[in-house]
Image (cartoon, rainbow, N blue to C red):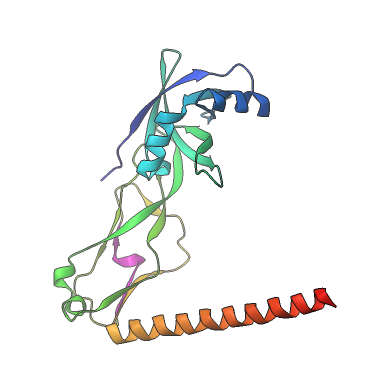
Amino acid sequence: MATESYVLTAEVRERAGKGIARALRREDKIPAVIYGGKKEPAPIAIPAHDMSIEYNKGGIMTKVCKVNLAGKEELVLARDVQIHPVTDRVLHVDFLRVTDKTKVVVSVPVVFINQDKSPGIEAKAVLNMVRHTIDLKCSAKNIASEIQVDMTGLEMGDTARYSHAILPEGSTFADTDRDYTIVTLVSSRAAASAAGDGAEAEEGEEAEGEEGEEASTEAAEE
């Protein structure tokens, strides 16, 4: 299933630069640029409210956007979004022009199907996730909203790999070096043991950190 699209209205920016960008943000607008498609880059400004709504919905890097610009419509895909480190406000967006020939690499979330046909899950296995998303190469106009992984027949201790994934039509794995692990079905006892080992490792790191801080303090006082 392809992801949904969204619509933004933009205006042309005649000039660029930090001063212009700051002035736009004071007017509740976000500086952005549309590039690619064998055309010159087009600096634009977008209403901050509209852009923030779309960004906060999530998945903006996999949704095609219809930008209304000076009476014309551009199909674009967000490829880079700059966020303020403190306020989390959108500061700048780079959009790629999208055509029928545009290919992109995107991270698509994993979902599991036929869990009721997995003996391991029926036996209360815990899903030890290795990859929550997988990078796909696909048409920018047909980006999948999810990658399905078939759990049919998987027993306790089994592993679901790339070969278990059902790829959307027209998509391929971005990395084809090997059959990577997506998830392993483990017992609740094994999962608890792994979690305990992780907690002990964190405590050890904290203790070492505290000793290091004390040593640094003593050295500074000397």
Image quadrant of residue 5?
A: top left
Residue positioned 36% across, 65% down in the render = 162
Res 140 visible:
no
Q: Residue furthest right?
A: 222
Please name whichever residue, 129 or 87, is drawn nearer the observer in this view of the structure: 87
Q: Is residue 59 left or right of residue 48?
A: left
Residue positioned 43% across, 32% down in the render = 51
Q: Is residue 177 above or below residue 19?
A: below
Res 133 visible:
yes
Please name whichever residue, 87 or 146, is drawn nearer the observer in this view of the structure: 87
Image quadrant of residue 147?
A: bottom left
Q: Is residue 56 above or below residue 29?
A: below
Residue positioned 39% across, 65% down in the render = 131
Please name whichever residue, 7 or 139, is drawn nearer the observer in this view of the structure: 7
Q: Residue furthest top?
A: 71
Horizontal and vertical percent position of residue 39: 55, 24
Horizontal and vertical percent position of residue 202: 52, 79
Is residue 67 within the magenta segment? Answer: no
Residue range corresponding to the magenta coloring: 158-166
Horizontal and vertical percent position of residue 88: 50, 44
Image quadrant of residue 72?
A: top left
Q: Is residue 62 above or below residue 115?
A: above
Q: Quadrant of the C terminus?
A: bottom right
Residue positioned 53% across, 42% down in the render = 83
